[in-house]
Image: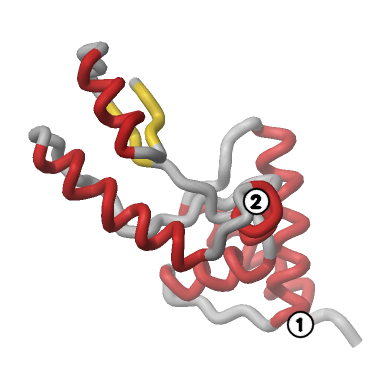
Amino acid sequence: MVWACLVSDIETALACEADLVNLSLPISDIHITHKLKRDRAWILETLKTLTPVAQKQGADVTGRNNRIVLGKHSGTSGVVRVYEDIGLTLSEPMAREILMQIRGFAINRKYPPDISDLKHLYTQAHAGESHTP
């Protein structure tokens, strides 16, 4: 498997006869703006460029478009977006609380939470919010 974020990555992977190429770009606003000196529009445009290149080479596109994976480097805006995708609305304080839980989860387990984990964290945070005076 090869992780790609540039057209040249896809070409190199194909030249090496990789059996799987994963198109991967950062989703953290901090990573995008400070490390890459880019913006979210650049990320989306890059995905629009990479996907047809991979498909032209016979790749299948699977999964959700613009999927956000939450982990130890996520921010509250990513948390809110992912929860909106699964039909749950978060208040800003709840998003901050869940973000802390997600970071702890990712650090302790060494993998990001899946949808059932996210729903469980939501239930825990919602129960805690209702008991707050």
Res 130 label? 1
Q: Residue 52 vs residue 110: left or right?
A: left
Mark 2 or mark 1: name the one nearer the start of the chain.
2
Q: Residue at x 68, y 74 (%)?
A: 126
Q: Residue 74 vs residue 13: left or right?
A: right
Q: Is residue 42 above or below residue 130?
A: above
- Asked if the residues shown at circle 2 and circle 1 are in contact, with their CB atoms under 8 angstroms apart, the answer is no
Image quarter hosting the N terminus:
top left
Secondary structure under badge 1? Answer: helix
**Front residue of 69 and 25:** 25
Q: Residue at x 62, y 66 (%)?
A: 122
Image quarter hosting the C terminus:
bottom right
What is the crowding at mark 2: few (fewer than 14 residues within 10 Å), some, or many (at least 20)? some
Q: Is residue 14 above or below residue 95?
A: above
Image x and y of residue 124, in percent: 69, 64
Q: Is residue 84 above or below residue 63?
A: below
Secondary structure under badge 2? Answer: helix
**Front residue of 66 and 57:** 57
* Residue that numbered label 2 is attached to: 31
Res. 102 in view: no
* Three-letter code for the amino acid on which mark 2 is drawn: His
**Front residue of 73 and 48:** 48
What is the crowding at mark 1: few (fewer than 14 residues within 10 Å), some, or many (at least 20)? few
Image x and y of residue 112, in percent: 57, 42
Res 58 label? none
Q: Residue at x 46, y 46 (%)?
A: 25
